[in-house]
Amino acid sequence: MDPIRYFTILGKDIVLSARQPRQAALKAASMGHTSIELRERGTKKVHVYHGERVRVSIPEGTPWGATEAWRPKVKKIKIYYADRIRRQK
């Protein structure tokens, strides 16, 4: 089992914990971010994703009675290594 890793969204003061970068990107997309650059803490890797939220219909008979819900979708664009990491103040 993979250990939990921490990812920060570049340009924002948000830290996401996940086992895989895609899982962190899905969390960011569900918050409404579309251009997602995740830096993995402890390394210089930056994972770049394009994200969106789409409306999906859910089956009838759900306990809360909703008919639609938001679902995040992400597509990986690239990985690059940052020469210098900008520290946020």
Image (spheres, rainbow, N blue to C red):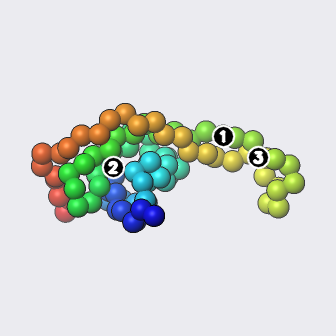
Please give the residue where the numbered disc 1 appears in the rendered image: 55
Nearer-N-terminus badge (2/3): 2
**Badge 1 element:** strand
Closer to us: 21 or 8: 21
Query: What residue do we see at 53% from left, 50% from top?
Result: 30
Closer to us: 39 or 55: 39
Q: Provide residue 46's location: percent of width, then percent of height.
A: 27, 46
Look at label 3 and name its amino acid. Ile
Nearer-N-terminus badge (2/1): 2
Q: Is residue 32 left or right of residue 85?
A: right
Look at label 1 and name its amino acid. Arg
Q: Provide residue 48's location: percent of width, then percent of height.
A: 34, 40
What is the quadrant of residue 15 in the picture?
bottom left
Q: Nearer the viewer, mark 2 or mark 1?
A: 2
Please give the residue where the numbered disc 2 appears in the rendered image: 38
Structural crowding at the residue carrying mark 3, measured as other residues with C-alpha within 10 Å and reported as few (<14), some (14–19) or many (≥20): few
Structural crowding at the residue carrying mark 2, measured as other residues with C-alpha within 10 Å and reported as few (<14), some (14–19) or many (≥20): many
Regarding residue 66, the answer to whether it shows in the image is yes
**Badge 3 element:** loop
**Badge 2 element:** strand
Q: Which mark is residue 30?
A: none
Structural distance between the alpha carbons of marks 2 and 1: 24 Å
Look at label 2 and name its amino acid. Leu
Q: Provide residue 87's location: percent of width, then percent of height.
A: 17, 58
The quadrant in which the N terminus is found is bottom left
Please give the residue where the numbered disc 3 appears in the rendered image: 58
> Do the residues under discs 2 and 3 have CB atoms within 8 angstroms?
no
The quadrant in which the C terminus is found is bottom left
Looking at the image, the residue that sits furthest to the right is 61
Structural distance between the alpha carbons of marks 1 and 3: 10 Å
